[in-house]
Amino acid sequence: MLAGKVIGTVTSTVKHTSLEGWKMLVVRTDTEPCIAIDCIGAGIGDTVLITSDGSFAGELTGTRATPVRWSVFGIADENG
């Protein structure tokens, strides 16, 4: 699990079938930028929690054969 800030989105004209319909975000962490799929509505500027849990990614996409490495599972509350 890592925390990071959403700095952009990813657009792809060709993608793995398990990624069809998913919003993909660029998340800057302390160590590196990551591409994560988003199921909770995060946007640019949000601080998010991402996980590399393959079981979670498989549940989200409906297949264990997904190339997804990172998934957004939380948005930090900036109000305190």
Image: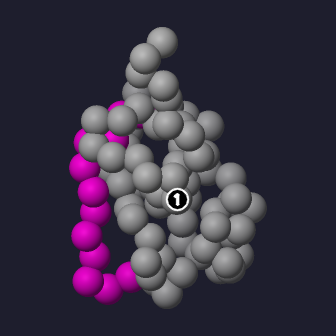
Tell me which residue sits at (48%, 25%) in the image: 77
Pinpoint residue 43: horizontal percent, then vertical percent. 33, 46
Residue 6 in view (yes/no): yes
Q: Nearer the viewer, residue 34 or 4?
A: 4
On screen, 77 above or below 25?
Answer: above
Residue 31 in view (yes/no): no
9 sits to left or right of 34:
left
Instruction: Please say whether residue 9 is one of the residues in the magenta stretch.
Output: yes
- When asked about the image quadrant of residue 24, the answer is bottom left
Range of residues picked out in magenta: 4-15
Q: Amino acid at mark 1?
A: Cys
On screen, 56 above or below 33?
Answer: below
On screen, 41 above or below 58?
Answer: above
Instruction: Please say whether residue 33 is one of the residues in the magenta stretch.
Output: no
Q: Which residue is mark 1?
A: 39
Pinpoint residue 50: horizontal percent, then vertical percent. 54, 43
Tell me which residue sits at (68%, 79%) in the image: 63
Tell me which residue sits at (28%, 76%) in the image: 12
> How would you rate the neighbour count of disc 1 (Cα within 10 Å): few for under 14, some for 14-19, many for 20 or more?
some
